[in-house]
Image (spheres, rainbow, N blue to C red):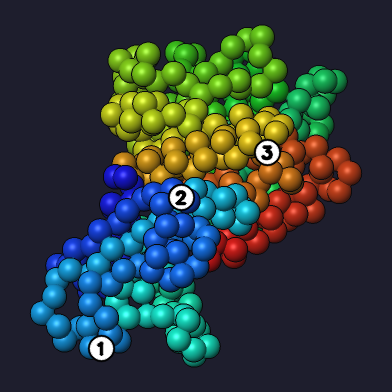
């Protein structure tokens, strides 16, 4: 409700109606069905119904001394189904339905004529673009994790393939950041890689790390463009879950403070969980990276939708707190599109899928294929 209230305030401001009031009722299919039957004689549920306080065209209404716009009724059940069909988050769909409902309240009506329908559609699009701009949304960027280039190198203990060369190819293909995880056990990336990358990366070097003293000292010496704090266990194959910030608030606050003092912004890798996001904000992190792993591992459609909604909602919450939101882990050529359509996420961090595909297609093609998925997903936002 808080997230929707903030969005409504922006819509009203954009429409020059900040001094007006409106009632928004979030309801279910049964209730909206009753209203649809009673007032429109349509015997089925719908997504949104608008009941203007006064009838008339946009110009007529503007002249009336009325500060009550009317009621907007939304079926969250239908909105949720539509969001799934359209590969959108529920909050995005509700946002669109609220805009649609508002435009009806101020006199737009797509049912009047095809010209009116076009006018309303254009206004909706214009309004959503403006709101997104106001909310500071940008095109989503791709940062590539080149750890697994080093994994192949370390398998032989030789000098090839070189993650530094890989990083340069990724950047030339359009990646906007390079990520490496300097693990305590040095299973893939080595200290010298990080120092070399600091000299060669032209976009942004993000050093992923556990919050342990040895690695913190190296990070403070290297001065990457940002660090991402992750939990690290020796036996794990890859990072298994988000960092538990709530339970380590004091310790992590000190680490974040040290990096902030050194001018290195900190991102914290967290599960899509409200408490972890709030705690990350409280301890002074600039970014959170939302763990997408459970969404990527989910098998049934119900589970995938549930995990996706958790990510969308957590990203919205983090965004509204003023954090810059990244996402990553387990993303591949099949599951990235849906996440890439979320406006609230600024950057995706992807490694294994791109490096795996590059064995067959070459690295440049693997990067460009992923960028195409991300860019196309964003074109479908409206
Ligand atoms: N983000 C974080 C915090 C990670 O630990 C990893 C894995 O190193 C990634 C993103 C990238 O995950 P993947 O290799 O599955 O794309």
Q: How many marks?
A: 3
Residues at marks 1 and 3 touching, judged by CB atoms closer than 8 Å: no
Q: Which residue is mark 3?
A: 301
In the picture, measured across the screen, residue 171 lies left or right of residue 47, that is right
At which x and y percent is residue 211? Answer: 46, 18
Left or right: where 232 falls relative to 59: right
Q: Secondary structure at mark 2?
A: helix
- Outermost residue toward the top? 235
Q: Residue furthest left?
A: 65
At x 89%, y 44%, the residue is 360
Pick whichever, 222 or 361, lies toward us: 361
Give percent across and percent down for residue 239: 61, 22
Q: Which mark is residue 30?
A: 2
Q: What is the spatial separation of the Cα atoms under label 1 and label 3, in whole angstroms? A: 46 Å
Tell me: residue 130, above or below residue 185: below
Label 1 belongs to which residue? Answer: 59
Q: Which mark sits nearer the N-terminus, 1 or 3? A: 1
Residue 17 shows up from this direction: yes
- The percent coordinates of residue 49 (x first, y second) are 40, 65
Question: Image check: 321 left or right of 124?
Answer: left
Q: Disc number at residue 127?
A: none
Query: Crowding near pointer 1: few (<14 within 10 Å), some, many (20+)?
Result: few
Q: Position of residue 220 (x, y in %)?
A: 43, 26
Kindly report the distance in space between the C-alpha atoms of the residues bearing marks 1 and 2: 35 Å
Identify the mark nearer the N-term, 1 or 2. 2
Q: Estimate the spatial distance between the alpha carbons at disc 2 and disc 3, rounded to whole Å.
A: 24 Å
Density class for disc 3 (Cα within 10 Å; few <14, some 14-19, many ≥20) is few
Which of the two discs, 2 and 3, sits closer to the camera? Answer: 2
**Residue in the foreground of this view, choosing between 289 and 158:** 289
| Residue 76 in view in this figure | no
């Amino acid at each position: 409700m808080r997230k929707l209230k903030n969005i409504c305030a922006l819509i009203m401001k954009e429409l020059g109606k900040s001094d007006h009031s409106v009632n928004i009722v979030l309801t279910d299919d049964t209730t909206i069905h009753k209203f649809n039957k009673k007032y429109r004689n349509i015997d089925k549920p719908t997504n949104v119904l608008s009941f203007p306080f006064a009838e008339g065209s946009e110009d007529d209404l503007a002249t009336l001394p009325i500060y009550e716009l009317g009621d907007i009724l939304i079926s969250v059940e239908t909105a949720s189904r539509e969001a799934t069909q359209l590969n959108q988050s529920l909050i995005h769909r509700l946002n669109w339905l609220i805009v649609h409902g508002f435009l009806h309240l101020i006199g737009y009506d797509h049912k009047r004529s095809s010209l009116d329908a076009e006018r309303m559609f254009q206004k909706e699009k214009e309004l959503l673009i403006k709101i997104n701009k106001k909310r500071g949304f940008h095109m989503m960027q791709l940062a590539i994790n080149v750890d697994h280039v080093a994994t192949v190198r370390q398998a032989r203990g030789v000098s090839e393939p070189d993650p530094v060369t890989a990083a340069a190819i990724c950047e030339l293909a359009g990646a906007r950041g390079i990520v490496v995880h300097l693990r305590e056990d040095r299973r893939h990336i080595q200290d010298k890689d990080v120092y070399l990358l600091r000299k060669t990366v032209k976009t942004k070097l993000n050093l992923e790390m556990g919050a342990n003293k040895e690695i913190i000292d190296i990070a403070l010496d290297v001065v990457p463009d940002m660090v991402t704090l992750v939990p690290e266990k020796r036996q794990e194959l890859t990072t298994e879950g988000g960092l538990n910030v709530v339970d380590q608030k004091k310790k992590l606050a000190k680490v974040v403070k040290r990096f902030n003092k050194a001018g290195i912004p900190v991102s914290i890798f967290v599960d899509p969980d409200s408490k972890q996001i709030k705690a990350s904000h409280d301890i002074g992190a600039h970014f959170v990276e939302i763990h997408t792993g459970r969404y990527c591992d989910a098998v049934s459609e119900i589970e995938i939708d549930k995990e996706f909604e958790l990510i969308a909602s957590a990203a919205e919450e983090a965004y509204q707190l003023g954090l810059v939101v990244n996402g990553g882990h387990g993303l591949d050529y099949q599951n990235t599109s849906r996440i890439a359509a979320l406006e609230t996420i600024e950057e995706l961090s992807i490694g294994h899928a791109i490096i795996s595909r590059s064995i067959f297609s070459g690295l440049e093609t693997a990067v460009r294929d992923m960028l195409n998925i991300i860019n196309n997903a964003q074109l479908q936002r409206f």
